[in-house]
Image: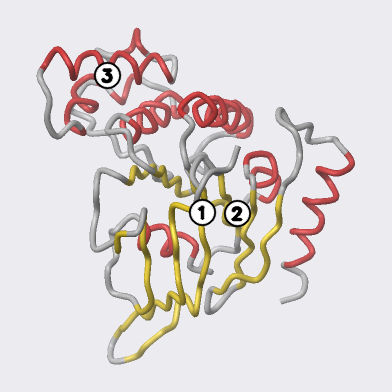
Amino acid sequence: MINKELLFVSHLTKNFISQSRSTTVLEDVSMHVNQQEFVAIVGASGCGKSTLLRIIGGLDTEYQGSVTLAGKRIAGPGLERGIVFQEHRLLPWMTVQENMEFALQSGSKADNDQLIDEHLELVGLKSFRNAYPGQLSGGMAQRVAIARALINRPEILLLDEPFGALDALTRLKMQQEILAIWEKEKATMIMVTHDIEEAVFLGDRVIVMSDRPGTIKKEVVIDLPRPRNRSDVVFNKLREEIYQEFHKE
């Protein structure tokens, strides 16, 4: 299933400057992501995992090292990278349809309407195109955010704790749905999460980050068939292996 390498992060270091004081958030981080791969990044709050995702997304360009996508250095935001945050960030005064249209940069109305139809159908919300964000549940709003991030056919989808604000049952359902989207779209995805079980359930690989400053501590290959059984002995062994990494710090 895994194709050629798509994303390279090489010797990435990120410092924050505040009141003439420098704090290292990420230190000498190197990693890669292959086409059509689902990579999960886990770590404690404050370890720099969301900062890493922002850099890959081009939202933060002040760093040392190299970040390239398909051989091109990332110098800012681009349509080849879609981003989904913990909050859905839909514009509340716009309908679902209008939020989707806002993400489209070009194209005729007929073409754009077809794209919107296809992507709302992908997340099971085609009948809610005229609803406002305030009329949607948290899970539904996040599904719209995922559809919006995918509508420009990005080469890679970045997910920054996208289910963190959802209740436990909705979160489990959304995990299943993001996997269905990943398999159907043959997408490349990177998800940041603090939930180890979620990382093992979703990821082809799990990258474990250490804290202060953030470095890559370990990489765990999740060689389990899908759909995955959370009560499976091997599943729980992999979860425990990752969990133990945080007790070594």
Residue 223 location, quadrant: top right
How far apart are labels 3 and 1 at the CA level?
Answer: 28 Å
Residue 33: assigned label: 1
* Residue of label 3: 116
**Residue 146, relative to residue 162: is it above or below?**
above
* Residue of label 2: 194
Question: Is there CB contact under 8 Å for labels 1 and 2?
Answer: no
Residue occupying image coordinates x 53% and y 64%? 31
Q: What type is the residue that disc 3 sits on?
A: Ile
How far apart are labels 2 and 3 at the CA level?
Answer: 32 Å
How far apart are labels 1 and 2 at the CA level?
Answer: 19 Å
Residue occupying image coordinates x 64% and y 51%? 205
**Residue 13 drawn at (x, y percent):** 42, 78
First in sequence: mark 1 or mark 2? 1
**Residue 184, relative to residue 246: is it above or below?**
above
Residue occupying image coordinates x 33% and y 12%? 128
**Residue 57, relative to residue 22: is it above or below?**
above
| Quarter of the image where the N terminus is located | top right
Q: What type is the residue that disc 1 sits on?
A: Val
- Along the horizontal axis of the image, is 209 left or right of 29? right
First in sequence: mark 3 or mark 1? 1
First in sequence: mark 2 or mark 3? 3
Pick the residue in front: 144 or 75: 75
**Residue 242 drawn at (x, y percent):** 74, 59
Residue projecting furthest to the right: 233
Residue 62 location, quadrant: bottom left
